[in-house]
Image (cartoon, rainbow, N blue to C red):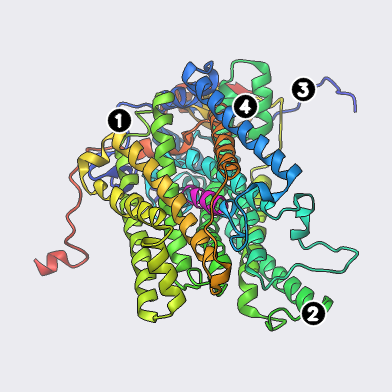
């Protein structure tokens, strides 16, 4: 597909850069109380208390891992039993065909393998990660030493929102449109 | 929305301190952390690095030549002769898998125990894990003698309708080591994504930004990203912990499940796992003493970190020593003549006594110096003793594998095992491969987890204090 040359549409928003994570948490609280929705934050490291401040629900990663583990372990065990006892039963050193203790290591490793791969894929899906050679972030300092707060605004309230953000200690406020 | 959001940092978070001292210098800022930890990527390599690379390549070429000769001429060029059909290749395999274990211990087990000091060393230790497993994987592939059909180890539907024997420890090994490799790579890569994004955003040239853009995968660090990332990281740690304990247990089962005297031993799994962590930490100390000097990371990998690792070395050394004592005691207590012969006689007083006493000195006596604080804080001693431990742990596997096979139940079969220079050449080659990989890694990826160090700095608010006394508890006031 040829590129249309049009810039991707971005809804009007304000990006505030804070130097201190606690100011960011305060700002989130202020704006959520004011009724703003669709807030987002950009931080260089996981800030303690941010998930609670943003009101995020419990992550679904543990469920993926548990599901992956049991799926992998069951599949591994069934596969072992099928190959050893049904597809081609061979008597080796008089061991039973379905020898549960001897199957345990591979069953366990199979569970761990599927659990790990599914967890990794779940992170890619949850954080929408995909290789992007031309990706540019909103501000280079967001992965360095600044804490960003992204607030979608209606065009007429942009100025007042920026004013409030400066009062809350934002070092820099950008108008994204 | 609730009004009870925690808006103050965890000033009382004890994990950012070690013995009342903060992990990192109080005047470090997070932009400074960024600069220091990415410096190695943007700088031109120094002479020290180039020299290391040259030596490592030399070692690798020796290894490649030896493997080429072996593939052309046959396995006879090695010291493998009946009855010792498991020779130094299996020793090398167990040694490298052992080296790999420290990385997962640091990244997973210490994470579950909330030991924040792991942040400075986990990235490089995990990298060592992956490169060590790569080296380990080479040896069984060469050792099976028909390397071209190594894929027969994998159970795949084939025209002969044959399947691998799932009741054999050798097949467990294939599954354990390959699972371990895959999980280690995923865990390592997932932990790197935020740091790769940092490098992407500060890279001075366009191709660099493109390259890091591909591997950092649009990471933005939004609240939701971190939320899921942290949860997944915890889950990874939770599955990697039993995995790391299982892998070396499975490797030890290769021996323990057989009936050869010297192998037929129930202490093997825990004893192998402790030995693996012991040798792995020794290798981590060996490499990190050089890395912190080469990349000027003394502010991040501090002497406190080195000291903590030395403490782990002492602890695991004691467990390994206990394993040796139990082996000998059980042989004596059980009064099986063949076991007495192997465990007591030939390992300590017979033809292999030189190796037996080497491991006693290197693994039981040498690490005892770390009981002294001065020794734990001396870089030279740390480096020298860690090398001694590496040598000792290699010989430990040598003693276990070689002695038991060379004199088993049938005296007419006995033969002294003598490795050839080909055996040594392959091991030298694997060392070269390991260090080439590690030095390349240090130039492409931040050797220390930037995001995690920043997180620890945030918790270092407040005054350093004396360590808590070991008294008190819930009812301290009541008792007082």
Residues drawn in magenta: B91-103
Q: Are marks 1 and 2 on the same chain?
A: no
**Label 2, on which residue?**
A89
Res. A177 in view: no
Q: Are marks 4 and 3 on the same chain?
A: yes
Q: Nearer the viewer, residue B173 or B388?
A: B388
Chain letter for mark 2, please: A
| Sooner in the amino-acid sequence: mark 3 or mark 2 | 3
Q: Residue B154 falls in which quadrant of the image? A: bottom right
Residue B101 forms part of the magenta stretch? yes
Instruction: Tell me residue B114's x, y (percent).
Output: 39, 51
C-alpha span from label 1 to label 3: 46 Å
C-alpha span from label 4 to label 1: 30 Å
C-alpha span from label 4 to label 3: 15 Å
Q: Residues within 10 Å of mark 2 (few under 14, many from 20)?
A: some
The disc at residue A7 is 3
**Label 4, on which residue?**
A137
**Label 1, on which residue?**
B25
Q: Are marks 2 and 4 on the same chain?
A: yes
- Check if mark 1's residue and mark 2's residue have beta carbons within 8 Å: no
SS for dot 4: loop
Q: Please tell me whether mark 4 or mark 3 is closer to you in this view.
A: 4
Image quarter of the N terminus of chain A: top right
Q: Are marks 1 and 3 on the same chain?
A: no
Tell me if A76 is positioned left or right of B345 in this view.
right
């Amino acid at each position: 597909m040829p590129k249309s040359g049009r810039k991707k549409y971005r809804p009007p928003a304000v990006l505030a850069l804070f130097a201190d994570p606690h100011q960011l948490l305060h700002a989130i609280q202020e704006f959520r109380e004011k009724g703003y929705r669709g807030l987002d934050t950009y931080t260089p490291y996981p800030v303690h208390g941010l998930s609670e401040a943003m009101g995020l629900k419990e992550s679904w990663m543990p469920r993926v891992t548990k599901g992956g583990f049991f799926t992998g372990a069951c599949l591994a065990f069934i596969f072992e039993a099928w190959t050893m006892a049904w597809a081609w039963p061979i008597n080796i050193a008089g061991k039973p065909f379905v020898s549960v203790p001897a199957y345990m290591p591979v069953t366990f490793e199979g569970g761990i393998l599927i659990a790990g791969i599914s967890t990794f894929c779940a992170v890619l899906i949850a954080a929408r990660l995909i290789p992007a050679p031309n990706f540019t972030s909103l501000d280079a300092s967001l992965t360095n030493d600044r804490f960003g707060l992204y607030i979608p605004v209606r065009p007429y309230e942009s100025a007042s929102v920026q004013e409030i953000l400066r009062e809350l200690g934002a070092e820099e406020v950008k108008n994204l449109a | 929305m609730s009004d009870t959001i925690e808006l103050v940092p965890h000033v009382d978070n004890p994990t950012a301190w070690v013995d009342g001292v903060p992990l990192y210098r109080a005047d470090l800022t997070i932009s400074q952390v960024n600069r220091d930890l990415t410096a190695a990527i943007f700088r031109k390599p120094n002479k020290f690095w180039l020299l290391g690379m040259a030596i490592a390549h030399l070692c690798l070429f020796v290894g490649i030549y030896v493997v080429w000769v072996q593939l052309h001429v046959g396995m006879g060029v090695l010291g493998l002769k009946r009855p010792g059909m498991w020779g130094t290749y299996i020793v090398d395999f167990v040694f490298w898998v052992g080296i790999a274990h420290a990385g997962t211990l640091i990244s997973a087990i210490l994470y579950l125990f909330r030991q924040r000091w792991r942040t400075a060393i986990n990235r490089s230790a995990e990298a060592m894990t992956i490169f060590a497993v790569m080296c380990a994987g080479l040896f069984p592939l060469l050792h099976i003698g028909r390397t071209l059909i190594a894929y027969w180890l994998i159970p795949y539907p084939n025209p002969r309708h044959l399947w691998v024997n799932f009741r054999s420890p050798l097949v467990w090994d294939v599954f354990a080591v390959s699972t371990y490799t895959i999980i280690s790579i995923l865990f390592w890569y997932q932990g790197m994504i935020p740091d790769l994004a940092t490098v992407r955003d500060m890279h001075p040239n366009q191709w660099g930004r493109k390259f890091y853009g591909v591997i950092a995968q649009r990471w933005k660090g939004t609240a939701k990203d971190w939320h899921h990332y942290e949860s997944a990281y915890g889950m990874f740690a939770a599955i990697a912990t039993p995995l790391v304990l299982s892998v070396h247990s499975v490797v030890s089962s290769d021996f323990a499940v057989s009936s050869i005297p010297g192998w037929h031993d129930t202490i093997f799994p825990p004893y192998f796992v402790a030995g693996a962590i012991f040798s792995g930490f020794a290798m981590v100390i060996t490499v990190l003493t050089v890395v912190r000097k080469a990349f000027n990371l003394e502010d991040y990998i501090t002497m406190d970190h080195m000291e903590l690792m030395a403490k782990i070395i002492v602890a695991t050394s004691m467990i390994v020593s206990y394993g040796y004592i139990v082996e000998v005691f059980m042989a004596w207590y059980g009064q099986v003549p063949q076991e007495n012969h192997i465990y007591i006689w030939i390992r300590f007083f017979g033809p292999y006594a030189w190796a037996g006493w080497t491991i006693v000195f290197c693994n039981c006596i040498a690490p005892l110096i770390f009981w002294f604080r001065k020794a734990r804080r001396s870089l030279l001693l740390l480096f020298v003793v860690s090398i001694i431990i590496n040598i000792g742990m290699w010989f430990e596997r040598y003693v276990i594998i070689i002695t038991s096979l060379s004199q088993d139940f049938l005296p007419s079969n006995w033969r002294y095992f003598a490795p050839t220079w080909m055996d040594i050449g392959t091991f030298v080659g694997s060392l070269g491969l390991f260090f080439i990989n590690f030095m390349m890694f240090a130039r492409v990826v931040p050797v220390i987890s930037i995001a995690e160090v920043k997180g620890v700095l945030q918790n270092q608010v407040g005054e350093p204090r004396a360590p808590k006394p070991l008294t008190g508890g819930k009812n301290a006031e009541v008792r007082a």
